[in-house]
Image (spheres, coloured by chain):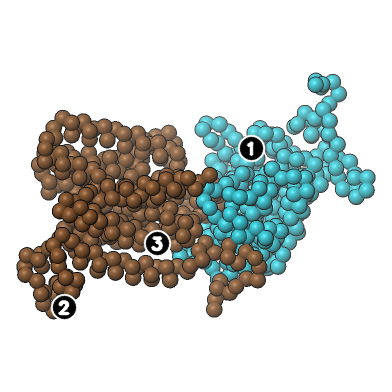
Chain colours: A cyan, B brown
Amino acid sequence: MTRVSDRTGVPGPVAGMTADRVRVEAGGRLLVDGVAVDAPSGTLTAVIGPNGAGKSTLLRALAGVERPADGEVRYGAAEAYGLRRRERAKLAALVEQDATTELDLTVADAVALGRLPHEGLWGAGEDRDEIVAASLDAVGARDLAARSMPTLSGGERQRVLIAKALAQRTPLLLLDEPTNHLDVSAQLTTLRLLRRVAREGATVLAALHDLGLAAAYADRVIVLDGGRVVAAGGTLDTLTPALMSRVYGVDAELLAHPRTGRPVLAVDLPEGAAED
Amino acid sequence: MTASDRPLAWTGLRGIRSSRLTVPTVTAVGLAALVASVAAAVTIGAVDLSVDDVWRTVAAHLGLGVSPLAPLQDGIVWELRLPRVLTAAAVGAGLALSGAVMQAVTRNPLADPYLLGLSSGASLGAVAVLLLGVGLLLPVAAFGGALAALLAALALARAAGPITPSRTVLAGVAVSSLAAALTSLVIFWTATGDAFREILGWLLGSLAGARWPAVAIAVGALVVVGIPLLAGGRVLDAFAFGDTSAAALGVDVARTRSVLLGGTALLTGAMVSVSGAIGFVGLVLPHAVRLLTGPGHRTLLPLSALTGAIFLIWADTAARSLFDPRELPVGVVTAILGAPVFALLLARRR
């Protein structure tokens, strides 16, 4: 009943992800407070907000990794935390920020970890090697397959971690700062890949620091501040100068690129802000 | 040819498998080597018996034919050598398996089965009964000591929140130090002459006293706890990128960690109770296997157990025959062999 794409292997179409009143506490501190999310399938949603806004925490709750103290997370029609862990891991994959390993894994081994939710106690699935190869292809990292994880550059590692999540073949893909440590070209390549994954039917949520990237590539944005949603909706409608001024305290505006017409971000400190 | 055997037409072909050698092949070779080691090791010893006579004696006790040896020599083979070799195999397997699991659960390459203070706890229990002169209770006391140390370490690790790898290690260090200090205190206060020698042998790890009850304890623990632990390989792989990553792959992190720590502790406790704290087997062998087959735990766990068994059989054979008629504690042999290997591993690590 699910279609498997030959390009990124994303199963789909599925009914997206929704969440309501999500509240996460840790050590007596409220990190995420009453957050609602509506991420339809086929879209790329950027979760943005200043440092400490609760982006990572929200993603963990949405990915099924950390049960929220209150609220509801739904994968399609299913209540996420009502599912068995294994089933949840077949529906949602998470690319953590800066995940590393001390083990001397090859890249192919690392990507194959994404198959674990689908495998039995001993055996690898019969289709494992094909899926690993296709996932590496999707991120343009096939030539890295035999390399050892500790020898990769930051950008290479990030692509491999995305391939690992793709190998999980989940309709929902969540990424925490996937463009961290990447040079500008690798950032654009990553965002294009995420968009392609979304176009093939997946629901993609990515926490992003770079408002310009969010503006250029995301279909929708969720703006967090202090653990609460301060705005959400279509990217161009939501990222208004007033909002960016309120949340980030900067004077920012989306303009059309003079040649391509894509939205680009013009950003400055407001008039009268302290100069160096 | 199944799909997973089919070669892929790309450069990463070799990288895609955690091991160049297939698991069934390596396991079969390992099992054959284990059986051969047992068969060879029983023929070696202080009393000069022919290989043929030894094997026929063992066969006779298994109901095949008649023993060619006089009762005294028959007893040496069946009551001393064979149980000792079998105990060495089971203890070696248990320690190497525990070490491999412990290193994965704590994400610490320097972890060994005694990490949670198990050996120190067991030593304290053992030393106490040795000095009280109730040697029969030794396995029970050692196991009790190991268990008490485990519970103390887990309680400490859990005191400030969920069990994390670093807290586990630190709690183990604290409990170890305390138990070791108490052991030294007891020895210093009370031990004299022969008791001191016996205690030292036990602290260093020795299989000299292994008879059939020891075989029953060690093999029993291996079957009841060790074999289920082997099934943890898939889950341990999921921990490669840390707890969150494991959780995102569908693993119940807290429960898995408790169950695996508890399992290795029971297994190690049983092994320590029959052999004392034999060092380096649980630390070095998993690393050696990793160098050969890669870090995938579905291969690492069974192969660690097999190589641990073979290694300890030969280490103990060396311990009892190299300086005949004097016997070395086997822990000294494993440390002499293990320490340089370990130094080499450390040097290779960037």
Identify which residue, A112 or B85, lies in the foreground. B85
Residue density around tag 3, few if under 14, some if 14–19, many if 20 or more, within 10 Å: many
Amino acid type shown at disc 3: Leu
Q: Where is residue A143 in the image (x, y as percent from the top left)?
A: 67, 60
Label 1 lies in what chain? Answer: A
Amino acid type shown at disc 2: Leu
Q: Where is residue B192 in the image (x, y as percent from the top left)?
A: 11, 35
Q: Position of residue B95 (x, y in %)?
A: 32, 53
| Marks 3 & 1, CB-CB < 8 Å contact | no
Label 3 lies in what chain? Answer: B
Q: Which residue is drawn at 14% across and 47% down?
A: B137
Is any part of residue B258 visible from this angle? no
Q: Residue at x 15, y 73 (%)?
A: B53
- Left or right: B262 in relation to A120: left
Residue density around tag 2, few if under 14, some if 14–19, many if 20 or more, within 10 Å: few
* Element carrying mark 1: loop
Q: Position of residue B108 (x, y in %)?
A: 45, 45
Residue A211 occupies quadrant = top right
Give me the C-alpha separation between circle 3 and circle 2.
Answer: 32 Å
Residue picked out by circle 1: A54
Label 2 lies in what chain? Answer: B
Marker disc for residue A111 = none
Q: In this view, does A187 lie above or below B88?
A: above
Give me the C-alpha separation between circle 3 and circle 1.
Answer: 44 Å
Residue density around tag 1, few if under 14, some if 14–19, many if 20 or more, within 10 Å: many
Give me the C-alpha separation between circle 1 and circle 2.
Answer: 73 Å
